[in-house]
Amino acid sequence: MQVYATRTEQLSIGGHTYRLRVLSDKRQFSDIDGHRAHSGLSATQWGLFGQLWPSERLLAQAMHRFAVDGKRILELGCGVGLASLVLKRRGADIVASDPHPLAASFLKYNTTLNALPAVDYRRLSWDTPDPSIGRFDVIIASDVLYEPAQARFLAQIVERHAYPSAEVLITDPGHDHSQHFSQLLAEQHFTLAEERCPMDDRDTPPYRGSLLHYMRRGKAFPG
């Protein structure tokens, strides 16, 4: 069994301090046991896991402000779990998901590290339908459009798992494939409101990407 080197990061979201176990660097995945081949993940998806990316922090900041009452929320590609932890702290009905085989253990560890109740987790392959997961009022994700096929896979997930009046929120650093994703969601009658989003904390540059907010009815994202 491969052993991974980890470290702990600490950051503030909405006045709350979060501690997160992440991989110590981006060179952890030699995949000597051949797990990636069995997981269905691309080499990029496999190797990018385990870091706290700026778009993930941006999504967590957005989820601190987002109205959650009465909404069932699905996070796609939860990674180390920050946005789902922010939602769990707020009492949201959140289901975290990721296709990576290590995501469940990292989410469980980080939930315990922050003294939060267990987060409902499902391992969800983006290209394989899973009707048992049900439908959601809100689907969220961060930095998930960095490969051409992902726009189509994610649009299909939205089609399968979004309620008719659902919202989709994705933080994106500016990948070319976000335009394709927007076109696919437009075919599902979503409209897009794009917002440049600053980080709330002071130790980062003021702009790290856009919040892509897709709606099927006239709602405005609270600032």
Image: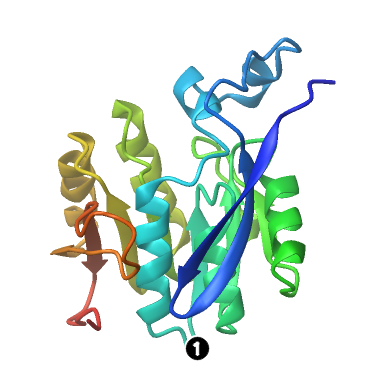
Q: Residue furthest bottom?
A: 69
Residue named by callout 1: 70
Q: Is residue 84 above or below residue 128?
A: below
Q: Nearer the viewer, residue 153 or 104?
A: 104
Asked whether residue 174 is in view, the answer is yes
Report the front residue among 89 and 73. Answer: 89
Q: Can residue 142 be spotted in the picture?
A: no
- Which quadrant would residue 92 be assigned to in this image? bottom right
Residue sitting at x 49%, y 29%? 45
What residue sits 62% from the left and 55% below the top?
A: 20
Q: Secondary structure at mark 1?
A: loop
Horizontal side of 120 relative to 182 (left or right) equals right
Residue located 70% across and 19% down the image: 35
Image position, residue 71 (x, y; %)? 48, 81
Question: In the image shown, does 114 or 118 lie closer to the viewer?
Answer: 114
Task: Give the vertical position of 88 relative to 84 (above or below).
Answer: below
Quarter of the figure with the C terminus: bottom left
Query: Quadrant of the rendered structure where residue 214 is?
Result: bottom left
Q: Residue furthest right?
A: 1
Q: Mark 1 is on which residue type? A: Gly
Near-viewer residue (10 or 74): 10
Q: Where is residue 63 drawn, in percent x and y?
A: 41, 72
